[in-house]
Image: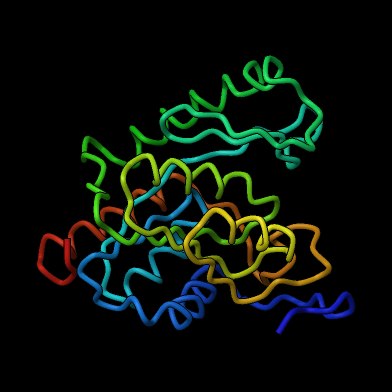
Amino acid sequence: MATTEKEVAAMFRDRVDAGRQLAGALSAFARDPSAIVLGVPRGGVVVAAEVARALGLPLDVVVASKVGAPGNPEFAVGAVAPDGVVSVNERGGYSAEQLSSLAEPVHAKIARRLEAFRKGRPEPDLRDRTVIVVDDGIATGLTARAAIEYLRRRGAMRVVLAAPVMPPDSARMLRGVADEVIVLDTPGSFWAVGQFYQIFGQTEDAEVVRLLDEAHRRAADGAEPT
């Protein structure tokens, strides 16, 4: 049920709670040998880790990142995929040349995160697989779109986008990009993802690394499919 303008109280205690609730909506994918969960760093990995653990699926990351507007970094004027492709926000008001310049530090950030999070591990083979992309919430949807389009280029058979919350217009846009969108709520009154959480602190890189290491250890021990 969509949240009305007057109902803007937090729906999730924290990212772990959101992940557990989201896992319930994704139960059809439990123990699917073709499925893999990819979290969008950094906060999305916390949610994705709970989804992967509950469904018995492997966990990895897809490191896409938004390009923020000068003076207003929370407003996404574009997004960068792990392979360097830049997606443009047509409503952002920036030319391709301007966006290319704004995206330069984002390319460097993605490279740093890939090195820190993968620790030399190769990217998973996504050919003929169902890829479940998980974030802790979606605002404009540009980063999610960049991630989905990148996964298509990597040969994913099916891409499912899953998030606890996103605005209705983003959900509509992303349903035209992903094969399926799973969202727990699409509130009409939406200012920021954090408004729907009681606890929404910053997730540090060390937490992402810990969750990925734990997931890879479980997979190596045979607790999850690879």
Q: Residue at x 18, y 59 (%)?
A: 217
Q: How is the image coloured?
A: rainbow
Please state if 135 lies on the left or on the right of 140 as rendered: left
Q: Position of residue 142 (x, y in %)?
A: 63, 45
Question: Can you say whether 76 is above or below 94 in the image?
Answer: below
The front one of 134 and 194 is 134
Q: Position of residue 105 (x, y in %)?
A: 57, 22
Q: Residue at x 50, y 29 (%)?
A: 85
> Which residue is the extreme one toward the left?
221
Q: Quadrant of the N terminus?
A: bottom right
Please state if 62 lies on the left or on the right of 18 as rendered: left
Total label count? 0
Q: Residue at x 50, y 49 (%)?
A: 42
Locate residue 157: give its quadrant.
bottom left
Q: Position of residue 29 (x, y in %)?
A: 33, 76
Q: Quadrant of the C terminus?
A: bottom left
> Which residue is the extreme one toward the front?
176
Locate residue 51: give its quadrant.
bottom left
Q: Position of residue 123 (x, y in %)?
A: 26, 42
Please state if 115 lies on the left or on the right of 108 as rendered: left
Locate residue 58: give its quadrant.
bottom left
Question: Can you say whether 50 is above or below 66 in the image?
Answer: below
The front one of 212 and 88 is 88
